[in-house]
Image (spheres, rainbow, N blue to C red):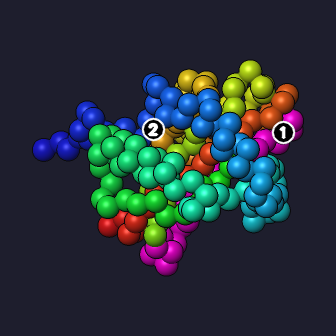
Amino acid sequence: MIITEPKWKKWVVETTQPIFTPKLCKEIINLSTTLEKENGKTFNKDEKKLRQSTISWIPFNKMELVYNDINDIVQKINRNHFGFDKIQLTEQAQVTEYSKGQFYEWHTDTRIQMETEPPVRKLSMTVLLNDPSEFEGGNLEIANLTMNPMQQGHAAVFASFLQHRVAPITKGVRRSLVMWFGGEPFK
């Protein structure tokens, strides 16, 4: 007997309609300017720089309704495409800014020692907050798949164990909202 994945199952889902209006995108960008910023620098074991960006974290109480709406959207996407058991929003949302020359090299959003770090990230989501005319480069690439260029307010939801990156910015600033959904370790 050959076992195949169901036809509905995907590892990457790109929204065909925006999940955020331009107004809400601007509100989130404005909110992020009031929050503490930190350098999003990550290095590998050989001290090679994997990431260069600016990040800020949005507390749950700063946009509770948005968190609830996003959770509803991702729960539906999970039911329709991924089928992961009992996922939940596990961390605060991150607003990430990439300026000219900044990037995030190939990486996954999971850890190797899943059994020691519940909740385990299972789904990652990126929403483009600004208009793509405001920057060049910075394409989100997932597992060597051909991705459509992201549009403002659109989201990509993907399995957190997939390799992905943000290509270097060549002009302007790219702003995105990143969130993770997880649960118990895979069995």
* Residue 105 screen position, x and y as percent: 72, 46
* Residue 112 screen position, x and y as percent: 54, 67
Give the class, few, some or many, for how many residues have Cα within 10 Å of label 1's Cα (few <14, many ≥20).
Answer: many
Report the residue at 29% width, 40% height from top. Answer: 80
For the residue labelled by badge 2, is the local secondary structure a helix, a strand or a loop?
strand
Q: Which of the pair 33/75 is nearer the observer? A: 33
Specify which label sits upstream in the sequence, 2 or 1: 2
Residue 125's tag is: none
- Quarter placement of the C terminus: bottom left
Please, which residue is most extreme toward the top here? 133
Where is 124 relative to 23, above or below?
below
> Residue 108 magenta-drawn?
yes
Q: Which of the pair 184/178 is nearer the observer? A: 178
For the residue labelled by badge 1, is the local secondary structure a helix, a strand or a loop?
strand
What's drawn in magenta, residue-wise? 97-118
Report the residue at 74% width, 21% height from top. Answer: 133
Residue 29 sits in quarter: top right
Where is 63 relative to 101, above or below?
below
Give the class, few, some or many, for how many residues have Cα within 10 Å of label 2's Cα (few <14, many ≥20).
Answer: many
Please count the marks in the image. 2
* Residue 8 screen position, x and y as percent: 27, 35
The answer to whether residue 160 shows anywhere in this view is no
Direction from residue 176 to residue 87 in the image, left or right: left
Q: In the image, what residue type sits under mark 2?
A: Val
* Residue 178 screen position, x and y as percent: 60, 49
Task: Please name the residue that numbered disc 2 is placed on.
Answer: 12
Direction from residue 114 to residue 40 in the image, left or right: right
Where is 44 relative to 141, above or below?
below
Task: Please name the residue that numbered disc 1 is placed on.
Answer: 99
